Amino acid sequence: MQDIVNVVGSWVWSYWLIGLCLGAGLLFSVLTRFLQIRHFRHMIELLFSNKESEKGISSFQALAVSLSGRVGTGNIAGTAAAIGFGGPSAVFWMWVVAFFGASTAYIEATLAQIYKEDSDGQYRGGPAFYIEKGMGQKWFGCLFALTTILATGILLPTVQANAISTSAEIAFGANGMLDTFIGEISSTKLTAAVVVVAIFGFIIFGGVKRIAHVTQVVVPFMALAYIALAVGIIVMNIGEFPRVINLIFSDIFTPMAGIGAAIGWGVKRGVYSNEAGQGTAPHAAAAAEVQHPAQQGLVQAFSVYIDTLFVCSATAFMILITGAYNVVGGDGGFIVQNLPAATDPNSPAFTQLAVESVLPAFGKHFVALALFFFAFTTVLAYYYIAETNIAYLRRFFRIPGELLILKFIMISAVFYGAVKTASLAWGLGDIGVGLMAWQNIIAILIIFLMGKPAIKALEDYEKQRKTGVTDYTFDPEALGIKNADFWSKK
């Protein structure tokens, strides 16, 4: 199974996809005149727009839901893996992906708002919707929806669940091994799997509104606590900071861990972490109650900064300052070995050991707790995304009890991921991310070439903002944007 996953993953994550992610981000940055810089202050202002309705959630709630998908295992174990396989300079490429990816996040989130629908009493939208309406290709929309259900319903939850159980095992020990029908499992991992499945089942049977209200409380609190811990560790070791910066910038182009390793792993883990271009965040963006589509696009652009420039950087600095990492070369040997050879770079071990070295008897447990909340809320976001794409497909065909089937499949995937190895879980997750990114980035590029709707929306919003209006309006027909039925009726 591991060999098959590795082969498929190498096909999906070829250098073509890495170039596509970086190229699209650069293109949209130029086309939007680097909105991620120009509108930085306004992005923060928009975060505190708390307009909520019976059909839609507030901008902040939408940010929290999308952040619950962005801020997860990728920030803790993903950053560690980027360093472990690509060297410290992979962190630089994660920053590059975040900077350019902010413009990509604006484009996809704005498209989701433009082409969203009022479905079953709540707002629905995402890549499948804007592919159908913006490109006029229903088959492509259905393909993306099916891919997304596969990725977020089966493949990606395994990574998050595995991170929770692995971090718990590192923090509390294995506590004995049990022989089961799926292999030998530690008591700690099995206990973690059961607890996560039980809580997950309770929440997803409560509906999308419950997901929004849970994430808007949990995600900001844990992210701030985690960043505060990282800042504390940096301040305690401030003399090491110049050395760490030199490590990050020393091998940006040189092959420390193999030619292109820093770029490849930095981009791969950057996209996995901040999800810019992947096509997951637009689902939450579409659910927001806003006056103008561009507003939620700007909010989502800022969420990329929160994810990578804040949370991922916090993880990277803690790992590099404490030296709690290894770097594995292309031949499988160690280029840098500061930890035992058995330490898995795909696990949260680097991060837990880094914090533990500064805060003994506390660090491993704190990271395990933070990872539980980050990863768990990410799985909740995945359920919402899968449910949205089922709602999209329901217009063309129905399967009796499809949502109930989805819930039990996801519960099974969460349990499976929690008890399997980290390498297998990450391999499955990478395939899911890559398949979605290929389709979504190609789609938003084609939609741009066909009519530039997201760019037109930005120009319209900026024009109204210059006039000092307090109540924004959006008229798609006046802008030459077709099939934006929700806004035309509004």
Image: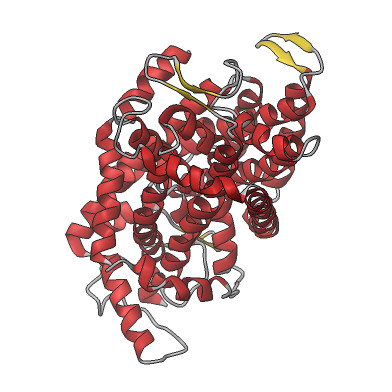
Pick the front one: 388 or 65 = 65
User: Where residue 435 sits: x, y (%)?
Assistant: 36, 35
The quarter of the image holding the C terminus is bottom left
User: Where residue 402 sits: x, y (%)?
Assistant: 55, 38
Residue at (71%, 26%) from the top-left corner? 170
Q: Quadrant of residue 3?
A: top left
439 relative to 391 in the view: left or right = left
Q: Is residue 37 above or below residue 218?
A: below
Q: Is residue 217 above or below residue 236?
A: below
Toward the left, the furthest residue is 449
Residue at (68%, 9%) from the top-left corner? 181
210 relative to 401 in the view: left or right = right
Pick the front one: 246 or 429 = 246
Residue 55 shows in the view: no
Residue 353 shows in the view: yes
Q: Quadrant of residue 100?
A: bottom left
